[in-house]
Image (cartoon, rainbow, N blue to C red):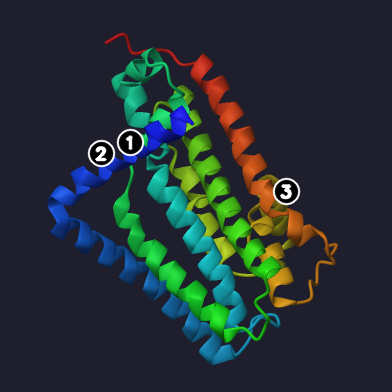
Amino acid sequence: MGSVRLYFRYLGVSIRSQMQYRASFVMSAIGQFLLTGAEFLALWALFDRFGTLEGWSLAEVALLYGMANVAFALADGFSRGFDTFFRQVKSGDFDRLLLRPRSTALQVAASEIQLMRVGRLLQGGAVLLWSLTALDVPWTPDRLGLLLAAVLGGACLFVGLFVIQATAAFWTTEGLELMNTLTYGGVETAQYPIAIYADGFRLFFTFVVPLACLNYFPALAITGHPDPLGSPPWLPWVSPLVGVLFLVVCLQIWRVGVRHYTSTGS
């Protein structure tokens, strides 16, 4: 609980500092909202032209889109420090974090909190709310609970990917642009049903980077859409836990990286 309180102290300091330039914050948030909104317009144009995508309607795909973008916005906003961590390795500033009696992962996550990501959060949330009203399904407590669990599990998964990206900097001392194919590219992938992809691509995003477990499978249970992959009916209800387990594994890999850290000596 002490670590949680410390994180919120970091959060409060970050909010106060970013609110010193409110116009800049508002413009950045609006820019994020419009940029991600343009992506959904492209999705809408696709369905306006073809009607459905492998049997999925616009409202059903909008559910996938909203879940993926809300989860990513939460992860990107509250763990942004991992994305820029390589700078601390190159400068030797990570030494100071090691001297403090707190988790290094907590300190890195809280070192940079991006409030402007609220633009993506609001845009993804707006699409998600629209899909909830457009879908012809009864919104029972179990469906709403599964939706919330899937979004939180997805946020854990994206945080885990940022952790892996940061861990690689212990050996490379640079940020790996390749990881963007799994973070930002993962959001793009998760916006569509995993069943439309080729077998190898689908297996990778189910068993290696399990994005399918955090939005596709829960969406099947929420919408009642049949799964052409033949997944068992119980899978969507436990799949959100995969995101939490993925983050736990990534944090263990982070600890291995910390043990191999070599200071710059400056």
**Which of disc 3 and disc 1 is earlier in sequence?**
1
* Whether label 3 touches label 2, CB < 8 Å: no
Residue 197, visible in the rendered structure: no
Q: Residue at x 70, y 66 (%)?
A: 142
Left or right of 233, for residue 25: left
Q: Marks 1/3: CA distance?
A: 36 Å
Q: Amino acid at mark 1?
A: Arg
Q: Mark 3 Cα within 10 Å, few/some/many (few <14, many 20+)?
A: few
Q: Amino acid at mark 2?
A: Val
Q: Residue at x 63, y 43 (%)?
A: 244
Q: Mark 1 Cα within 10 Å, few/some/many (few <14, many 20+)?
A: few
The label shown at residue 207 is 3
> Residue 73 location, x and y as percent?
43, 56
Q: Tell me the quarter of the picture where residue 136 sits.
A: bottom right
Q: Marks 1/2: CA distance?
A: 6 Å
* Whether label 1 touches label 2, CB < 8 Å: yes
> Residue 70 location, x and y as percent?
48, 61
Q: Amino acid at mark 3?
A: Phe
**Residue under label 1:** 9
Q: Residue at x 51, y 68 (%)?
A: 66
> Residue 25 location, x and y as percent?
21, 57
Left or right of 137, for residue 172: left
Left or right of 135, for residue 104: left
